[in-house]
Every structure is written in C-alpha cells, then in structure tokens.
Image (cartoon, helix red, strand yellow):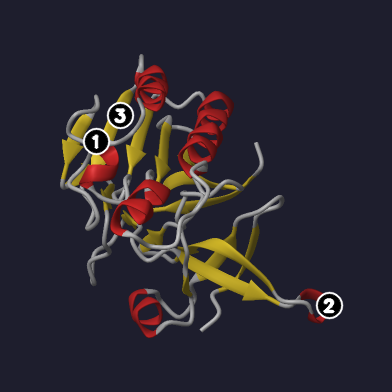
Amino acid sequence: MNGYNFTLAGVELVALASGALFAPSKSWLCVSDLHLGKSERRARIGDPPLPPYETRDTLTRLEVDLKTTRATTVICLGDSFDDALAAQALPDEEKLWIAAMQAGRRWVWIEGNHDPGPLELGGAHMNELPLPPLTFRHIAQSGQSGEVSGHYHPKVTLRPRGRPVTRPAFLVDSDRIIMPAYGTYTGGLRSSDPILSTLMRPEALAILTGPVPQAVPMPR
C-alpha cells in the first residue's frame, strides 16, 4: 500500500498517496472535500466553464482506494458536493456508482460548509462523527485532541533542484490531522497561512500526496 504510516491518539493510520486516510486496524477510510459537481455549479452560476469530468475522476480514485484497502467504513469529511444543488444534479449513472460503493459498507457523510450532506443519497448524515479516541468533523476546533478535519485544503510547495513542486498535503501533529482535499478540481491553502500555523503545533509534519508520499516539517 503506497502511503505514509503514523499514529494519532494511539490509532495507527496511513496517509495514502491519493489524499485518503486509512486506519488498517479499524478498516476506516476517510476522504475530505470531494467537491463533486464543481463544474456543474460553475456553469449554473455563469462562471467560466470547466471540463465536466471531475466527478468521474474523483469517484474513480475513490473506487481504487476502496478496492486497495477493503475498508468497511467510509467517512466523507464534509463538502462532498460543491453545493446542495450539485448533489441533486448528479447524473443517475454517478448516483448508482456511489450506491455500488456504499453496498456492504458503513458510509457517513459529514456536514460541510458547502453542503448539508447529500440527503437523497444513502448512508448516514452527521454533523460530526466521534469514533473514540478520534473525532471526525469538517472544520478544526482549537484545543481539540484526536481530531481529524478538512475544510482548508492544505498544500505545500517544495523546491527540489530549484524547481517548485506544489502538492496537496496532510498536516499532522500530536493533536490533529487536517486532511488534503480529495476532489479533482479543488484548490488549496498554503501551509504557511496564519490560520494553519495557529492550529498546528510547532513540530507538525506535512505529508505530501503524490506518487511517493513524503513527510517534511510543515512549512510556515
């Protein structure tokens, strides 16, 4: 399995190359900020159009992660759709695709700031999910320990051989994880942004996604 192994609150976790988080002993797979339907929403509100392929690309990668990990619980950590109307506009073929991935698994949609959770799709819908010693929610809360959250879409730029390379990244310290965005068309917030520097401890790591996940001290 292509990933970076670490622990939070005593739970063994793997930051996968794709941007998903896997707990092997619990059989949990967590993904954050899918933002499915972003191209549909942009077209609907009159923004410059994007090629309408991001939902299929994101679901393809999720299906691969499910087959690789054989996870029995899936936690979608908020902003699964770009807005509530994007969830309703999802083509039937893609709704059936999601239903097929849900079959035989516990599937939890966490409420995000972009969407209340796709209520017409299967699975449980929750504001946050406590699975002690961890708690899964969309936006980090200062002072919380054992927390897994998303929302900020952290990214990190490295300069190997002088050439900048920017990748989505997990931010990890002894209290929390802030997940990278999993969606194909999502942007990102640099790890040096003050809000992320405030949330993360000085010793925090950034685990870069990509072909070979790489852990570095979190750039500030």
**1 vs 3, front mark:** 1
Residue positioned 66% across, 53% down in the render: 210
Residue 107 has which mark? 3
Q: What kind of element bears circle 3?
A: strand
Q: Earlier in the sequence, mark 2 or mark 1?
A: 1
Query: Residue 134 vs residue 211: left or right?
Result: left
Relative to 124, does residue 131 appear above or below in the rendering? below
Count neighbours of disc 3 (C-alpha within 10 A) and say few if under 14, some if 14 to 19, many if 20 or more. Answer: many
Q: What kind of element bears circle 1?
A: helix
- Whole-angstrom CA distance, mark 3 to mark 2, is 43 Å
Q: What kind of element bears circle 2?
A: helix
Amino acid identity at mark 1: Gln
Count neighbours of disc 2 (C-alpha within 10 A) and say few if under 14, some if 14 to 19, many if 20 or more. Answer: few
User: Residue 160, how many percent across, how many down?
Assistant: 78, 74
**2 vs 1, front mark:** 1
In this view of the protein, which residue sits in the foreground, 72 or 55? 55
Determine if residue 32 is in view.
no
User: Residue 212, how many percent across, how many down?
Assistant: 71, 52
Q: Earlier in the sequence, mark 1 or mark 3?
A: 1
Residue positioned 35% across, 20% down in the render: 99
Residue 88 has which mark? 1
Residue positioned 35% across, 58% down in the render: 150
Query: Residue 158 vs residue 188: left or right?
Result: right
Query: Residue 19 vs residue 45: left or right?
Result: right
User: Residue 118, how many percent across, how many down?
Assistant: 22, 37
Q: To which quarter of the image does residue 218 belong?
A: bottom right
Amino acid identity at mark 3: Trp
Q: Earlier in the sequence, mark 3 or mark 2?
A: 3
User: Residue 113, how many percent across, how many down?
Assistant: 22, 58
* Disc 2 target residue: 161
Q: To which quarter of the image does residue 16 belong?
A: top right
Instruction: Tell me whether circle 2 and circle 1 mark residues in contact (CB < 8 Å).
Output: no
